[in-house]
Image (spheres, helix red, strand yellow):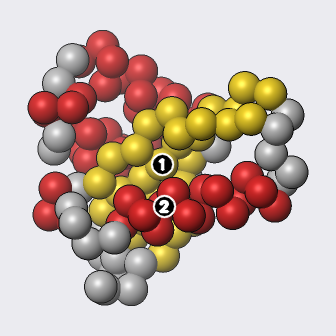
Amino acid sequence: MTDLRIHPLGPGDERACERILRALPDWFGIESALRDYVEDCGRLPTWIARNERDAVGFVTVRTHFPRAAEIHCMAIDPAWHRRGVGRRLVEFAANRLRDEGV
């Protein structure tokens, strides 16, 4: 697999999240829900995976209680499906949450 960098959502990354969500109309085809997910990226903990040039996936988590969190939204660019991006994002998010005591 190509080297991926995973980092917290930064300035302008919401546009990349929206682009990825729009590339998945079978899962995120309802416009109002898609917009809500994009907005959530900016207000909930979100990590984005990038290759050398582009964002290829992201994961957003929601913490319900001090020791309980769940994946709120995760999306991977279709060109990157079945290449381990989702697994890497889930592992990364789980490790970060664990480090924070969640």
Residue 3 at x, y percent in the picture: 39, 86
Going by the numbered disc 2, the residue's amino acid type is Leu
Residue 101 as seen in the image, left or right of residue 45: right
| Placement of the C terminus among the 4 image quadrants | top right
Q: Which residue is mark 2?
A: 89
Residue 90 at x, y percent in the picture: 51, 57
Residue 65 as seen in the image, left or right of residue 53: right
Residue 39 vertical position relative to residue 69 in the rendered view, above or below: above
Q: Which residue sits at x=80%, y=27%?
A: 65
Q: Which residue sits at x=40%, y=44%?
A: 74
Q: Which residue sits at x=16%, y=56%?
A: 78
Q: Are marks 1 and 2 in contact (CB under 8 Å)?
A: yes
Disc assigned to residue 59: 1
Residue 71 as seen in the image, left or right of residue 55: right
- Circle 1 crowding by C-alpha within 10 Å: few under 14, some 14–19, many from 20: many
> In this orientation, does residue 38 appear?
yes
Q: Which residue sits at x=82%, y=38%?
A: 67
Disc assigned to residue 21: none
Q: Residue 83's image quarter? A: bottom left
Residue 84 at x, y percent in the picture: 34, 70
Q: How many marks?
A: 2
Residue 53 as seen in the image, left or right of residue 65: left
Q: Secondary structure at mark 1?
A: strand
Residue 8 at x, y percent in the picture: 60, 58
| Placement of the N terminus among the 4 image quadrants | bottom left
Label located before the other in sequence (1 or 2): 1
Query: Could you tell me how far apart the alpha carbons at marks 1 and 2 are, in whole angstroms?
Result: 6 Å
Going by the numbered disc 1, the residue's amino acid type is Val
